[in-house]
Image (cartoon, helix red, strand yellow):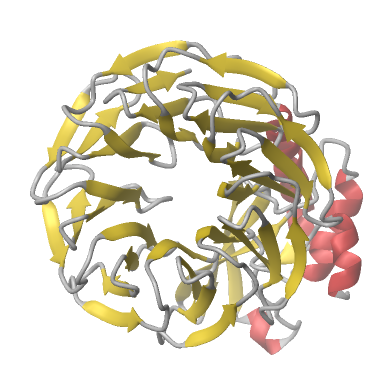
Amino acid sequence: MRARDLRLFGVSMATKPLSQGSKSEKMKLKSLLLRYYPPGIMLEYEKSGELKTRSIDLLELSPGTDVSALVEEIKRAEPLITASRTEQVSLLVQRLQEKLRENSNHSFYLFKVLRAHILPLTNVALNKSGSCFITGSYDRTCKLWDTASGEELHTLEGHRNVVYAIAFNNPYGDKIATGSFDKTCKLWSAETGKCYHTFRGHTAEIVCLSFNPQSTLVATGSMDTTAKLWNIENGEEMCTLTGHLAEIISLAFDTSGNRIITGSFDHTVAVWDASTGRKVFTLIGHCAEISSALFSWDCSLILTGSMDKTCMLWDATNGKCVATLTGHDDEILDSCFDYTGKLIATASADGTARVYCAATRKCITKLEGHEGEISKISFNPQGNRLLTGSSDKTARIWDAQTGQCLQVLEGHTDEIFSCAFNYKGNIVITGSKDNTCRIWR
């Protein structure tokens, strides 16, 4: 079965299918698990006594997909899925289809206002389940909150300057990383609030950070023009990514954790091998500072946004530019893919956002209504809604296909610079310069 044929049914193997025969005979399927966003089935199997996992990605799945035909394609592509598993796989696919229909018309109401910090917030981030979230602040702390009650669980204290970059080690959610203007990054227990490690080595402010998907590394990006990879277990520096000529303000791992991308004020984006720290290639084409850089879910594309008013789409295998997305009248402040990588959204200082089709590179719709610059944009997990945060003190929910504004989330008294959906898409957190964050349900 050729990969090209499989794409017709939206089946792609996260790892190369194993050939039938002696190798597959040594493998035993232990369990099948659902992954709702993006749609997929996780396989847990035993090989030579070792427990391993891999995924069947169903990125093209829709409520109208022919389940029987899809299951037959899965069986042909994946030796671990035998005839005896047909019914189970069919039920899993049907459950994924049901999930795609959920939360499509969710209307949000203000649940809680949290007077979070004594100075303005810098960022908000949710854990995967949405059960708790964190806020960073100019008051030098990070706070952990219970989403259901709005209660403060822990105050993470110890930084000597602004806590600017924050993240959970999703999907696990048991650790938190904080990056500060004090040039250090700290690793904390989400359960106890205890500090595990302080990562020292940068010579200027840390402004971005990310855990790898395996939660074995944390990457930090700094105004000192370098990024560093740190070992979570022992707290040691693994390597320094050097080569940029100006500040690094954006970084992200790909889905596999094998590569990391850094965006810089030197107008370039670099792609690195995460295990060696070696630069794979540099993406050159933007003519102003980079504002965002990220991989698509299947790691085939890279999206970069810039102060030059454009986004560029790059082939992640060779570093060649495949499209320039134009139309904005001012700087691009944020950009993102939906979970499946079919849609791209851009947010601009011109007060509008745009949605593009990743395949045709054409603009599908324009989101108009904000009265100030839009600094944050993200898709809900289902991919049919967009959330934007603006300097006009509001956040908005939009229909991703039509561009219609469905809801205005009002109440903040200063600009909103951070906002996020939870994994299910039924909770929104907004963070503002008014020192509060709001929970919308």
Residue at point 73% right, 50% down? 89
Q: Is residue 349 left or right of residue 232?
A: right
* Rendered location of residue 217, percent (x, y): 33, 69
The answer to whether residue 30 is above or below residue 38 is: below
Q: Quadrant of residue 302?
A: bottom right
Q: Is residue 65 left or right of residue 353?
A: right
* Rendered location of residue 180, percent (x, y): 21, 54
* Rendered location of residue 13, percent (x, y): 71, 67
* Rendered location of residue 269, percent (x, y): 53, 72
Q: Quadrant of residue 226?
A: bottom left
Residue at point 57% right, 23% down? 371
Residue at point 70% right, 54% down? 341
Q: Nearer the viewer, residue 121 or 72?
A: 121
Q: Nearer the viewer, residue 428 or 244?
A: 244
Specify whether residue 330 is in view: yes
The answer to whether residue 259 is above or below residue 63 is: below
The answer to whether residue 279 is above or below residue 436 is: below
Q: Quadrant of residue 106?
A: top right
Residue at point 64% right, 67% down? 299
Assign the N terminus to one quadrant of the image.
bottom right
